Every structure is written in structure tokens, then in C-alpha cells.
């Protein structure tokens, strides 16, 4: 969903001939909500074992 919204935002910002300001603002708001949700899902630092393949 995050990648899709970023793609839509890029496309809206490249549009000419119309004013996509309201749509851009809505997408930016949605991105902020998605990113905040993803941050809440991150485990606390050092709560997971080291990834031996990383």
C-alpha cells in the first residue's frame, strides 16, 4: 500500500493542465498514516535475535 501511494503521488505531481493539490494533500496524509502504523509495528531494538544471514 505504501509503495502504491508513493507511485500515485509521483504521478499526481507530474500532471499538468489540472490542479491536483487536494489529491496530493490527501495522498500525503495517507502516507503519513501508513508510515506511522508501520513504525508502531516495529519491534523494540534488540528484541529480536541477530539475523545470521544479514
Image (cartoon, grey):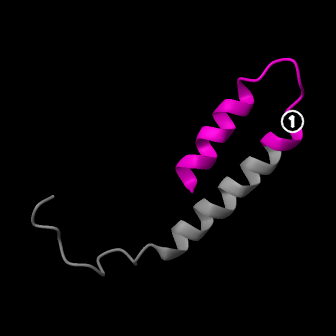
Q: Quadrant of the N terminus?
A: bottom right
Where residue 19 appears, x then y in whole percent?
89, 28
SS at mark 1 in the image:
helix
Where residue 18 appears, x then y in whole percent?
89, 24
Residue tagged 1 = 21
Q: Nearer the viewer, residue 4 or 50?
A: 4
* Principal secondary structure, stretch drawn in magenta: helix
Left or right: 54, with 12 as reference point: left
Q: Quadrant of residue 32?
A: bottom right
Where residue 37 appears, x then y in whole percent?
59, 70
Q: Quadrant of the C terminus?
A: bottom left
Where residue 27 appears, x then y in whole percent?
74, 48
Q: Which residues are magenta?
A: 1-24
- Is residue 15 found inside the magenta-colored segment of the image? yes
Image point (60%, 43%), residue name: 6
Left or right: 54, with 23 as reference point: left
Image point (53%, 67%), residue name: 38
Q: Nearer the viewer, residue 49 or 37?
A: 37
Q: Residue furthest left?
A: 52
Q: Quadrant of residue 29?
A: bottom right
- Is residue 38 found inside the magenta-colored segment of the image? no
Q: Quadrant of residue 20?
A: top right
Image point (54%, 74%), residue name: 40
Quick check: 17 above or below 47? above
Amino acid at each position: 500500500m505504501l509503495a502504491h501511494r508513493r507511485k500515485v503521488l509521483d504521478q499526481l505531481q507530474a500532471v499538468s493542465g489540472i490542479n491536483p493539490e487536494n489529491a496530493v494533500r490527501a495522498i500525503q496524509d495517507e502516507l503519513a498514516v501508513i508510515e506511522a502504523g508501520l513504525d508502531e509495528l516495529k519491534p523494540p531494538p534488540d528484541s529480536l535475535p541477530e539475523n545470521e544471514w544479514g
